Image: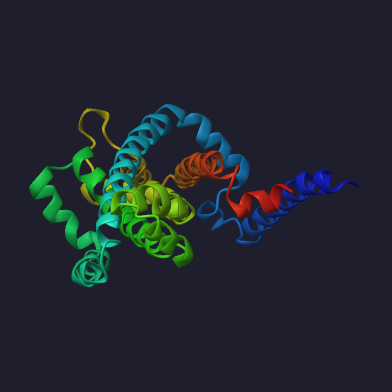
Amino acid sequence: MSKSKLDTILPVLSSLGVIGVWYAAQHAMGPDRQFLLPAPHQVFQALVAKAPELGQAARNTALGAFLGFVIAVVLSFVLALILSLSPRIRRSFYPHLMALQMTPIVVLAPILILWAGPGLPSVVIITFLICFFPMVVNTTQGLISTDTNLVDFFRMCNATKRQEILMLRVPAALPYFFTGMRIAATLAPIGAIVGDFTAGNSAGGQGGLGYLTIVFSSQFQMSALFAAALVSCVLGFIFSGAVIGLSWLALHKWHESYRTSES
């Protein structure tokens, strides 16, 4: 069997194994507790039955996640450029970034609701806060980790600071930048769902997956809860897949990690 076929078959076999274990676990729980772990076919039935509600909620969550993610990417890149200019600047701002990262979102949510109001604005801000820190840290690290020999060569050639940053440091930092984007892409849907939990608004069909899980939980619809979790997982895969695709487009022709894997 060829390696490509094996690489295709193994994930399928492992998925079938997981489904088998799932059915066995539900059976082992006994009739009185099986409702706590709905079978895969019951989750699929709930997914079909609740498709309109799940679809609308997924669109709302995706919008909040996308806006917060994009704002985090843009602002983190700008701040990383500033932080890379001087160790003194990094020492001045890093404690504040750490404080922002360490502050629990559930503490900030009531403040954000009072400032921005419930609904999409607060969800976007919460998503931004969750995605922002890994983007800043990774991009800054990439900008200050440029090969010193190349930096010395640019300076020997009397390159300006702008030329050094735009033509040397930014291209060299792209792998770090996209690594940060991958981390942020996995966090963005989570941030939007958490934001919907804490600061969401269901008025006018604005409720996302976080709000929907609250509704399903209060009604004890276990199959629908698992279906909402499945949709959330798919949303995360879409975000991560999009960033991986962008990373490949930007790096595969010249960066050694892609050239090595494709050779």
The residue sitting at the front extreme is 157
Instruction: Give the camera-side residue of 144 and 248.
Output: 144
Q: Position of residue 225 (x, y in %)?
A: 44, 46
Q: Position of residue 32 (x, y in %)?
A: 55, 57
The residue at 30%/49% (across/down) is 162
The residue at 24%/51% (across/down) is 198
Instruction: Give the camera-side residue of 133 and 27.
Output: 133
Q: Count of labels shown? A: 0
The residue at 40%/55% (across/down) is 157
As drawn, 11 above or below 86: above
Q: Position of residue 44 (x, y in %)?
A: 57, 37
The residue at 14%/51% (across/down) is 112
As drawn, 28 above or below 187: below
Task: Judge from the rendering whether residue 70 lies leftward or rightward of residue 30; answer left or right.
Answer: left
Please say whether residue 85 is visible from this viewpoint: yes
Please say whether residue 182 is visible from this viewpoint: no
As drawn, 88 above or below 158: below
Instruction: Give the camera-side residue of 88 and 44.
Output: 88
Q: Position of residue 159 (x, y in %)?
A: 35, 52
Task: Judge from the rendering whether residue 205 lies leftward or rightward of residue 209; answer left or right.
Answer: left
Q: Please, which colouring scheme is shown?
A: rainbow
When asked about the image quadrant of residue 18, the answer is bottom right
The residue sitting at the right extreme is 1
